[in-house]
Structures are given as C-alpha cells and as structure tokens.
Amino acid sequence: MNDNLAHPFPRAGWRNALGGLLLAATASLAHAPASAQGYAGLGTEAEGFALPSPETNFSFPRDHGPHPDFRIEWWYLTANLSGEDGNEYGIQWTLFRSALQPGEADGWDSPQIWMGHAGLTTPDAHFVAERLARGGIGQAGVSAHPFEAWIDDWQMRQTGGSTATLGSLSLSARGEGFGYDLSLQSDGPLVFQGNDGYSVKSPDGQASYYYSQPFYRITGTLSLADGPVRVTGEGWLDREWSSQPLSETQDGWDWISLHLATGAKLMGFRLRDRAGEPFTSATWIDPDGTAFPYSDGHLSLTPLAASDVSGADIPTSWQVDLPDRALSVTLSALNPQSWMSTSFPYWEGPVMISGTHSGRGYLEMTGYGPE
C-alpha cells in the first residue's frame, strides 16, 4: 500500500472500506463461495454492462488493456520453474479488475476496483500475498501501449519484443517470506480460446472473451528465506473479460494449462453444475501455435484422490483424457497444500504430468473448501 496516497480513511479503515467494496463486487473476482446465483455471483444478470459477442473483433495492443464497460477482467500468469538447487517451483501473478458499474471516472469517483494475488509454490511450502486497490487514484491499473499492469509495487511490464504478442515482459511481486523477479520472452503467437476468442461457458450460452500467451520462456530469481534461487522455466498468460460468464447453477470450476514435453500445450476446464453434468471446453495447441478448440464433452477431467487442505477434501490428483489427441494423463500436485488463503480462497498450484504424455502445468480449482 502506498502510504503517500491521501486516503479519506485511516489505514485500517481504508482496508475495511475497500474490502467491503470488493465484497460488493464478488461477481468480478471468481473466487468467492458458491451462491444461489452461480459461483461467486458470476451467474447474476449483468444489467447495464457490456456482453461478449460471437462476432469477435480483437485489436492489439488495445485489447491488452482494460475494458471498463465489462464487469469482470483479469491478467493471469502462471509459471512452472526449475531451480539451480534442483527443486521444482511454481509462481502465480494475477491482477483482477472489478466494476461496480460500467465505465471509468477520475479519482475516487472511479467505479473500478482492483485486486492482486501473488503465489509461490515449493515442494514443501506455499506462499500467498494479496493487494487491494481502488481505481482512479493511480495505485493500480493497466496501460495497453506500452503494456504495463501494476498494483502498488507489483508489476508486469513490457520490456521489448512485439507489442501485439506481448513479446517480452518483466514480472515482480513481494509478500511475506517470498518474492520473485522474472524475465519472460515469448516464442510463439497469441492463442484464441473457444471460437476465435469467444469462450462459451455453459449450455445456456454464457461466455467470455478469452485469449492466452502460453509460449513464455522464463529466467530470473526467486527470493526465499534461505536465499535467492535462480530459475528457468515456462509461463502461461491468460487474458479474459466478461460480465456474466456463468449460469446461475454453476458453482465452481477446475482449470488446467499444460506444457507437454512434445512442445504441444493444452488448456481445459470443467465447470461444475449442481443442476446437471459438468460443462467442459479445451484447446489443443500445436508447438507452432496452431489451435484446435474442443467443445463440451470432448475433454474428460476426473478427480482421482483428495487431500485435506484447510479442513476440506480437495482433489489434488486428476485423470485427464482428450481421446481426439490420444492423450490420457495423470496430474499430480507438486504441493497439495497450494491453498490461496486470500479474501476469496481457492486452490492453485503446479502439477506434474505422467501417462501418454509427460510435462508439467498448472491447476486451478474454485468453489471448494469450507463453507
């Protein structure tokens, strides 16, 4: 938190007031407990907000920036890393934007609310930090050209390469007991999920705009209690925005991003529905970036074993099958205790892949945990 900002509340009062605003905007954050109106309120009607259209018309670098007429948006990066110490690691860096109403305004009149999450996973520990901010006062935001996303001193910033594909980025975050400073270099194109970036989320047709940059090569340093660790690895950036992406009966999801040893990649998700069967979607990505979308029913995500995480049984081993690609693999969590104990808690951490294919990736699960 930047102490130089002129807040109308004392420090604790500022956090409490902002926390209340964030609770009022849970529909944008996708990590609150399930409700009667879809997971985290994401099934509520988006009156007054813009909605995605199947007639997608992306424009870059503009669309790397914010879309304040939509209720929900995020810049979401995960990375699988290998340390010079011989250990495997994972990091997450996410900036969420939530709108109390459509549009933007200056200063404290801005209806935009921001939340940052940072995580670092080791085989033996999981570190979490969270930042909150109100839009309009410079504490958090995103600029499209040159690209920069920030909240307080956490930054994701373009350092070179193609602006259209977010070619080169620097990434940094700090929290209690951990930090990281990383350089990212993409060696592939953007990938548009679903139908050219129009990602359907339910049989009722709810959808989001969704594209990814899954081709980052990463170098940098992790900061841990035992000292700095040099790392290398691969990263995956997701960009998504919408206003009502779920139906009112969908109460959570299981999402994967996999880097396969062949150079191919796979994105997939399963949206759990208390009124019926889960809804699935997937994208197979060839090493050259050619994408092949798969609609509901082609991908199978099946939990195999659960772990006691924060007092709840949460599946941390999964069977993943995509028969059209002869893929049948098991995902095993690097650290089953990868619980994001943030204002809106969820599970997120690196996984190792075995079976017909090898590799590593990331797993996110929402809607689990204590009520």
Image (spheres, rainbow, N blue to C red):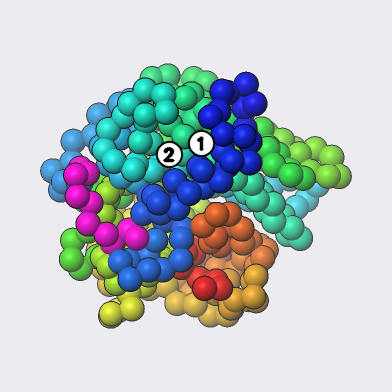
Picture residue at 78% right of the left edge, 50% below the top:
86
Q: Is residue 142 visible?
A: no
In this picture, residue 66 sits left or right of residue 311: left
Q: Is residue 129 visible?
A: yes
The magenta segment is 41-50
Amino acid at pointer 2 = Ile
Q: Tell me the quarter of the image containing the N terminus.
A: top right
Q: Do the residues under discs 2 and 1 have CB atoms within 8 angstroms?
A: yes
Vertical comparison of 272 with 167: above or below: below
Q: Is 145 included in the stretch rendered in magenta? A: no
Front residue of 109 and 94: 109
Instruction: Give the residue at mark 2.
Output: 113
Amino acid at pointer 1 = Ala
Vertical comparison of 144 with 285: above or below: above
Instruction: Give the residue at mark 1.
Output: 133
In this picture, residue 39 sits left or right of residue 47: right
**Labelled disc at residue 280:** none
Label 2 or label 1, whichever comes before in sequence order: 2
In this picture, residue 123 sits left or right of residue 359: right
Picture residue at 32% right of the left edge, 74% below the top:
273
Query: Could you say where residue 190 lies in the image, as x and y percent from the top left?
Result: 36, 38
Q: Is 45 included in the stretch rendered in magenta? A: yes
Vertical comparison of 222 with 143: above or below: below
Crowdedness near tag 1: few (<14), some (14–19) or many (≥20) residues, C-alpha within 10 Å: many
Picture residue at 37% right of the left edge, 30% below the top:
110
Query: Could you say where residue 255 lies in the image, as x and y percent from the top left?
Result: 44, 61
Question: Main SS type for the magenta part?
Answer: loop
Front residue of 300 and 42: 42
Picture residue at 59% right of the left edge, 57% below the top:
340
Label 2 vs label 1: CA separation? Answer: 6 Å
